[in-house]
Amino acid sequence: MIQPLPLTDICVIEIGHSIAAPYAGQIFSQLGARVIKIESSTTGDYARGWGPPFIEGAAALFHAMNNGKQSIRADFSDKDCLARLRAFILEHADVVIQNLKPGNLEGHGLGAQALTAEQPSLIYCNLGAFGANGPLSDKPGYDPLAQAYSGMMSILGHEGDAMSRVPLSLNDMGTGMWTVIGVLSALRTRDADLLRRGQIVDVSLYETALAWMMVPLSDVLAGAALPKRNGSSSPNIVPYQVFDCANRAILVAAGNDTLYARLCHAMELPALAQDPRFIANGGRVENRVALIELLQARFKELPAQTWLAKLEAVSIPCGPIQTVDRVIANEQTQALDILRTTPDGKATTVALPLSFNGQRPPLAGNTPTLGEHDYLLHPFTHQTNPET
């Protein structure tokens, strides 16, 4: 039996583009909310063109972030259109999320202060690049800028390599997640408030990046030297990295002293388990180079599948480094049933990474074409409602 979704009584207006706000909207949609996406009448969401690959005119990325939503075009230079949009929001919305350039919506009467003053129960979330305060609060930005500015890029890769970034929209999607966390918290507060007062929530890519950087920032604040670029390894845990075997590489994560001792015995290196330099993790970090050289030499003697079998037999976290096609075909991925296809069969993407009572929420629906639900702002015209 399909479990009822938790947000079926919530209407979210997404005035967003690219990834951060659309990803937040996507999470709300799969949790049962009605999500209405407001797009530019001239360009639509820029992400519609972020391909190839394309699926019937829209990028696969756009389908992944926007299935199950409704799409309304808005002409922000048209006062009549703005008035209808504003009235629609005030009548229907529980939540507004937006990631337009700072100040953009304020100039159109759709900013947080104006709408919450008129509708106090509204929860309004601003997704910015650098946060609501400070000298950069009005500065626009994308995910790579947040990676660079937060110090994230300074610790990625190997020493001597060209600077690189995480090739994912890590901060965009993380900011989308913080949007959901903040809005759900505000909804809970509103539900407990006799006056049902909403709140203004602010999140940003830079704050999300700083949250991901919590450990290196905390280390430096505690007096540690600036972190080095350690490739696949951890600055705080050893051994916790990729090792080259006779045929290919594997990842080994011996995250505590007990696992380290098991690793040594599984690799038939009992002396390393007793070496005073390596018994405790702090010593292993200080003597990283010496230990890794010894372990690496041993790993090179046997093929990856042999090492994986030996390490898994004693419950040491380890695994192959898979390409994306192998991840899709992997039996664990398939068993989780997390790759879902939209009802029209056009796009397959990743569903929510959570389940309720063993049931994963389904994709909320198909991906809307640009302006597919414009009739919502024109209820008294003779336009056809495509859902009837």
Image (spheres, rainbow, N blue to C red):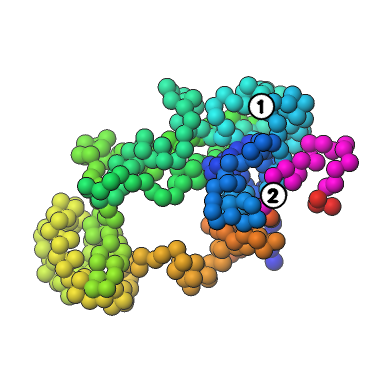
Q: Quadrant of residue 97?
A: top right
Instruction: Tell whether position 380 is magenta.
Output: yes
> In the shown orientation, is residue 385 left or right of residue 56?
right
Residue sitting at x 81%, y 50%: 386
Q: Nearer the viewer, residue 331 or 101?
A: 101
User: Circle 1 sits on which residue?
Assistant: 110
Q: Nearer the viewer, residue 204 or 70?
A: 70
Do the residues under discs 1 and 2 have CB atoms within 8 angstroms? no
Q: Residues within 10 Å of mark 1 (few under 14, many from 20)?
A: many
Rendering coords of residue 365 (x, y %):
69, 55
Inspect the image, locate mark 2, and give the three-letter code of the amino acid beneath it. Answer: Pro
> In the shown orientation, is residue 101 left or right of residue 280?
right
Residue sitting at x 45%, y 31%: 130
Inspect the image, locate mark 1, and give the three-letter code of the amino acid beneath it. Answer: Leu
How far is mark 1 from mark 2, CA to CA?
Answer: 23 Å
Rendering coords of residue 372 (x, y %):
74, 46
- Image quadrant occupied by the N terminus: bottom right
User: Circle 2 sits on which residue?
Assistant: 368
- Residue 207 appears in view: no
Stretch of the chain drawn in magenta = 367-385
Principal secondary structure, stretch drawn in magenta: loop
- Residue 299 appears in view: yes
Q: What is the secondary structure assignment of the residue under circle 1?
A: loop
